[in-house]
Image (tube, rainbow, N blue to C red):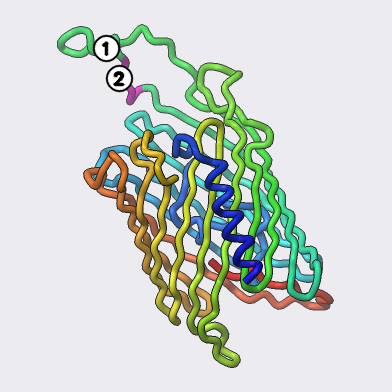
Amino acid sequence: MRIIRWITVLVVATVGLFVGRASAQDPQFTQFFANPIYIAPSYAGASTGQRVIVSYRDQWSVIPNTYRTMSASYDVNIESLRSGIGVFALGDLAGDGRLGTIIAGLNYSYSIPLNSKLNLRPGIGFFFRNHSLDYDRLIWGDQLVNTPRSSTTMQSIGKSSVYDIDISTSILLHTAAWWVGGTWDHMLRPRISFYSEKARIPFRFSVFGGYRFVIRSLYRKGIDQSFSLAGNARIQGKFSQAEIGGYWYKNPLMLGLWYRGIPLVKDYNGSDALAFMIGVRFSRAQVVYTYDLTVSKLGPGSGGSHEISLTYEMPLIQRGRRYKPLQCPPY
């Protein structure tokens, strides 16, 4: 119970520190629990063997040309080296100007056993970033002065594409039942502006954690029923956001409820949402769907957001292994 008390204190303190305008400047996923490498490089290889994850998000589906994000990752646990290696790729598209973001990178983690039940995993990620914009699809203010609308503009055109590199570091502390960790993203503050070389992505700091309560475990078949609580809070520049919730698992069904936002902070439209989750998990595969119901001033007229993820794990036969790492509990 002492562990649960400290995790609760950590989550509450983190949310208190992050009170501000609730927003996120990076692409985000409601199913942060199903996109672990995007949260922290420490999750690379934090599985039983090989793992493939694909996620897709359609945010505010009724509003035309809003945010559509897709990610894919592959990671492997190399037990003989106490290491995990993963690759991650993300594509995001937004607005009439087709503002695009592409992120691709390599992640590495190392497993450090502190005792038979407690494990520490530092991690690091190296990323390539590209931001692009289609100026031909934009309409400038001076084009609206005349009727009919002018096809030309006096507005200066910036770069159509910006490239840069980035680094993330993280730390993960876990047992077979609970986990807690933190991430420092955008350590190199990569360029993002199409006009000014001085405009760069601000640092992003994240704290996450959770606990899995095992209700029933079957001999040789593993956990048959459990309940998991998890939270994820982050701050980036002047903006902050948090998610907290939980899900019940009864083989193979998963049902959950999540809240995104910061209570009592309502000055940013669309920041608060309730996410309803349903999924199935088998021995190797997991499929999860979530629907975000917007509860802030933007309202249900946005159509909410849809997200789906697919996870597939494959065993890996490793010869000559001397060390078997403690597995982090699955989300």
- Number of labels in the image equals 2
Element under disc 2: loop
Q: Position of residue 115 (x, y in %)?
A: 80, 71
Q: Is residue 215 left or right of residue 322?
A: left
Find disc 2 in the rendering and name its residue: 139
C-alpha span from label 2 to label 1? 7 Å
| Residue nearest the observer in this picture, 38 or 301 | 301
Foreground residue, 141 or 119?
119
Residue drawn at point x = 43 percent, y = 80 percent: 250
Amino acid type indicated by mark 1: Gln
Main structural element of the magenta stretch: helix, strand or loop? Answer: loop
227 vs 288: above or below? below
Q: Residues in magenta?
A: 136-140
- Residue 63's x, y, as percent? 26, 40
Going by the image, does 17 lie left or right of 63? Answer: right
Q: Residue at x 60, y 50 (%)?
A: 207
Classify residue 151 by image quadrant: top left
User: Residue visible at 38% across and 42% down?
Assistant: 271
Give residue 159's position: percent from left, percent from top. 50, 20
Taking the spot 53% from the left edge, 47% from the top edge, the residue there is 15
Identify the residue position indicated by label 1 in the image. Answer: 143
Asked which quadrant contains residue 296, the reply is: top left
- Residue 116, image x, y percentages: 78, 75
Question: Are the two marked residues, 2 and 1, in contact with CB atoms closer than 8 angstroms?
Answer: yes
The residue lying furthest to the left in this view is 147
Q: Is 248 placed left or right of 235 in the picture?
A: left
Q: Would you place residue 149 above or below residue 46 in this image? A: above
Q: Which image quarter is the N terminus in?
A: bottom right
Amino acid tagged 2: Ile
Q: Quadrant of residue 180?
A: bottom right
Q: Is residue 234 above or below residue 245?
A: above
